[in-house]
């Protein structure tokens, strides 16, 4: 009789929920239990650390292991301070672009063109809501050159090969008047880190 695998709680950013669910399904990681915080927290990154702390403390008694599926995500190191005090690990890197592309590959992309605006599958799917409406460009199109004056290209870091998302990303580049570059990444370090946690 095989030993029962202890459940692991993955506290994740809602922007990568779909990818985590797909990895769970592909790998049969039924013992990974997913709890997502709303993706819109990225608009207020200063709120992420304490929200994550509250969820860790709320669920600690239920799970022998908790893993945080966030990068730093604009918290300026504050998330790491919370996780150190709580004894919890997170995904590597500064943001999801880096862990999807891989740290070295992302550094090379950034060095090749500092003026790059990045999309993931999630951001391509929700570009209209998060960028166009989120930055009020639909109401004030005159703000577009002010916001994007220093960008030269849009880099679509694609987790999947999806023609509809590719078309959305290309349309986003056209809307922002940026050159378009496609970089297929797959799930990158999100997959390897979750595999490491799942196999403990």
Image (cartoon, grey):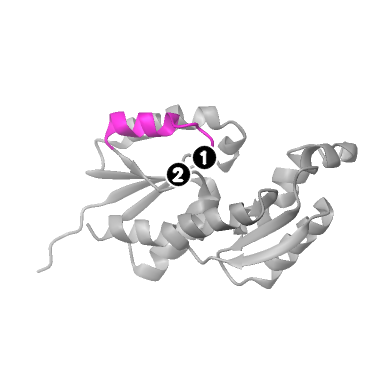
Q: Is residue 161 left or right of residue 53?
A: right
> In this orientation, which residue lies closer to the viewer: 37 or 131?
131
The residue beneath circle 1 is 73
> In this orientation, which residue lies closer to the viewer: 30 or 187?
187
Q: Residue at x 55, y 32 (%)?
A: 45
Question: Does the magenta-highlighted stretch encompass residue 44?
Answer: no
Q: Residue furthest front?
A: 111
Q: Residue at x 70, y 48 (%)?
A: 115
Number of residue marks: 2
Q: Quadrant of the N terminus?
A: bottom left
Q: Is residue 41 left or right of residue 137?
A: left
Question: Does the magenta-highlighted stretch encompass residue 77?
Answer: yes
| Disc 2 and disc 1 in contact, CB within 8 angstroms | yes
> Local crowd at mark 1 within 10 Å, few (<14), some, or many (≥20)?
many
Q: Which secondary structure, mark 2?
A: loop
Q: Residue at x 35, y 51 (%)?
A: 33
Label for residue 145?
none
Label for residue 70?
2
**Coordinates of residue 40 in the picture (x, y in percent):** 60, 39
**Coordinates of residue 78 in the picture (x, y in percent):** 44, 29
Figure check: 57 above or below 89: above
Q: Residue furthest right?
A: 142
**Coordinates of residue 29 in the picture (x, y in percent):** 33, 62
Residue range in magenta is 73-87
């Amino acid at each position: 009789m095989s030993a029962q695998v202890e459940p692991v709680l993955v506290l994740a950013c809602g922007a990568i929920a779909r990818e985590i669910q797909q990895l769970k399904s592909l790998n049969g990681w039924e013992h990974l239990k997913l709890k997502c915080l709303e993706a819109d927290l990225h608009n207020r990154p200063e709120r992420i650390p304490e929200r994550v702390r509250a969820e860790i403390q709320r669920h600690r008694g239920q799970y022998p292991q908790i893993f945080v599926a966030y990068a730093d995500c604009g918290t300026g190191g504050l998330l790491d301070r919370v996780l150190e005090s709580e004894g919890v690990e997170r995904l590597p890197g500064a943001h999801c672009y880096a862990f999807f592309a891989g740290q070295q590959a992302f550094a090379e992309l950034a060095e090749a063109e500092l003026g790059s605006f990045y999309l993931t599958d999630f951001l391509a799917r929700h570009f209209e809501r998060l960028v166009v409406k989120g930055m009020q460009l639909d109401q004030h199109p005159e703000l577009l050159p002010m916001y994007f004056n220093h960008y030269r290209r849009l880099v679509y870091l694609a987790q999947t090969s999806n023609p509809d998302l590719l078309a959305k990303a290309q349309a986003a580049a056209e809307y922002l008047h940026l050159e378009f570059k496609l970089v297929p990444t797959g799930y990158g370090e999100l997959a390897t880190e979750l595999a490491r946690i799942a196999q403990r």
